Amino acid sequence: KVLGVVLRAFRRAIDRALEKHALAKVFILRGNHDDVMALVLAHCLAMYYERDPRVEVSVSPATFQWHRFGKCLFGFAHGDKTKTADLPLIMACDRQEDWGQTVHRQVLSGHLHHEIVKEYPGCTVRTLQTLAPKDAWHASKGYRSGQSMICEVWHREHGRVMQHSIGIAQVRKRAA
């Protein structure tokens, strides 16, 4: 059931992105709760869109994934393997040439499930909330993070130019 819901949610997001953009690049990161399932999801989506040249789905099992867009450099990491403060230096080390040729840099992470934005020299790290409900273990430990997703719009020269946010209540209403 979970895989079906997640696949439908990703397909809807990708299809919506294609309504406004010429290309949709999809990165799915393995996390501490879904090590194998994340790769299954990535391969399912890659196969579903394999005949659509406008969709690129990364099936890499790498802990860190990177994407260059003009003067912008993006990093993606689940966040369970490294400290948030180390992510900018990992980006600078792994993508030295891109780091030197870009001005706007951001690493997205999700492990903590709290919305946190921290600026470091040369790079911002943004930790995202989750749409997933709390399981019994997290609820019993007192975790009460919000549930939302964001959409950022980036310009290849000027960096982030817009951000949209949608909470879980809106997601449920639109899914109904």
Image (cartoon, helix red, strand yellow):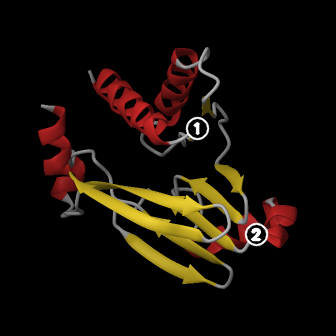
Residue 23, x across and y down, in percent: 59, 37
- Give the structural element (helix, strand or loop) at label 1: loop
Measured along the vertical axis of the image, is residue 129 above or below residue 86? above
**What amino acid type is highlighted by mark number 1?**
Ala
- In the rendered image, which residue does mark 2 sit on? 102
Q: Which of 134 and 91 is in front in this view?
A: 91
Choose between 142 and 106: the one closer to the eye: 106
Looking at the rendering, in which quadrant would you find the N terminus? top left
Callout in the foreground (2, 1): 1
Does residue 113 appear in the picture of this structure?
Answer: no
Task: Pinpoint residue 136: horizontal percent, then vertical percent.
Answer: 18, 46
CA gap between label 2 and label 1 equals 22 Å
**Disc 2 + disc 1, Cβ < 8 Å:** no
Amino acid of disc 2: Thr
Residue at image mark 1: 22
Q: In which quarter of the image is the C terminus?
A: top left
The mark that comes first in sequence, 2 or 1, is: 1
Residue furthest out toward the right:
97
Q: Which label number is shown at residue 118?
A: none
Image quarter of residue 24:
top right
